[in-house]
Image (cartoon, rainbow, N blue to C red):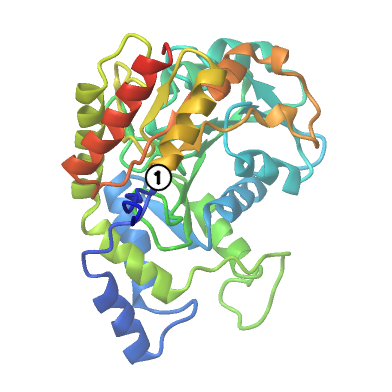
Amino acid sequence: MTKPKVRKIPVYKPDLSGNEKAYVDQCLDSTWISSKGEFIERFESGFADYTGIPHAAAVTNGTVALHVALVALGIEPGDEVIVPALTYIASVNAILYVGATPVFVDSDPKTWQMDPADIKRKVTPRTKAIMVVHLYGQACDMDAIGKLAKKYKLLVIEDCAEAIGTRWKGQHVGTFGDIATFSFFGNKTITCGEGGMVMSTKKPLVDLSRRLKGQGLAVGREYWHDLVGYNYRLTNTCAAIGVAQLERVNELVAAKRRLSESYRRLLKRPDIEWHEEQPDSTHSYWMITMLVKDGSLREGLREFLADKGIETRPIFPPIHIMPMHGGKLEEFPVAADLSARGFNLPSWPGLEDDDVAYITGHINGYLSTHGG
């Protein structure tokens, strides 16, 4: 007897139904496929217009965007940078790249973002900056963080890799700090395949970032390099994909918000908690994320869903417990709890209603059976 075919639903896949192929073909026809060409400037200026952050330099990915941002701000060995324990490893790796020391803070249990009260507790005479991470599409409390930065004379880096379309009091995230970074990896709300952006309201920082990403090339001189730089330049072909994606960014963000509403409507359970949109913010739902009541239940549910062809992702493990940092879970109890109980559902904007019903039906069935 033939076994029924299992549906395959990935946790994410990009929507490439716009002008992506046409623009890439245009690059190929022109032979401008490397780090020069019209689409790079179009992508930079278009994304600046979308976010309201006036100055932008495109780079190869979100991690190097963070590295360049830290170098441009002058972060160096001996400096401390406050960063959430609950984040993707790239945020912390970039701090280590420049020889600075990451200082971890716990999460706010309501927003899941870095806790401003814990930021205040962690400031020392060596603190140079706060790296704000807008996790999973929710904005951090930029009012509280801005006040702390002003009080202690700290720089602010906004890691907006997961926050395309996220707003705080009507302003796009990335407009509040000294410098901001974005990612356009294949699972981001808009993608280049690989790509990133360094942005700021302060033109000199982006001018320096542009030099840093291009091998430290001096202004106005050919092949003359007067500072140590990197080869972090985005290609014209990747930028072409980004331009096509940017043409539909509002549509894609709206689709993800509708998807979140569909999940919540079909999973109205007292044993599930959601990453809720907070007052004063607009959640972009990069990854639609839920909590179950305990970690052991989560792993059983994820295994059950995987058997049904439904891919999920666990919430990031707290960075401080990884081997290079060697901390204990008890040091950051909120981050540890969220990490143990949470996971991301399939979150791509083109997910069909029938797929959502399939996913939520299996979740409801499992939790009803296993005492969720």
Q: Position of residue 36 (x, y in %)?
A: 45, 79
Query: Is 137 on the left or on the right of 127, as rendered?
Result: left
Q: Is residue 78 left or right of residue 263?
A: right
Amino acid, disc 1? Val
Q: Point out residue 321 in the picture as x, y percentages from the top left corner.
A: 73, 27
In which quadrant is the C terminus drawn? top left
Q: Quadrant of residue 336?
A: top right
Callout 1 crowding tier (Cα within 10 Å): few <14, some 14–19, many ≥20: some
Residue where numbered disc 1 is placed:
11
Location of residue 125 in the rendering, given as x and y in whole percent from the top left corner: 76, 20
Measured as percent of width and height from the top left, residue 196 is found at 48, 56
Which is more toward the observer, 63 or 327? Answer: 327
Point 67% across, 31% down: residue: 319
Between 147 and 310, the one lying in front of the other is: 310
Residue 177 seen in this snapshot: no
- 3 on left or right of 251: right
What residue sits 22% from the left and 64% below the top? 17
Where 111 falls versus 1 (above or below)? above
Rendered residue at 71%/69% (across/down)? 226
Classify residue 37 by image quadrant. Answer: bottom left
- Quadrant, the N terminus: bottom left
Front residue (pair 343, 193): 343
Horizontally, residue 349 falls left or right of residue 353, namely right
> Which residue is at the far front?
1
Q: How many labels does the image show?
A: 1
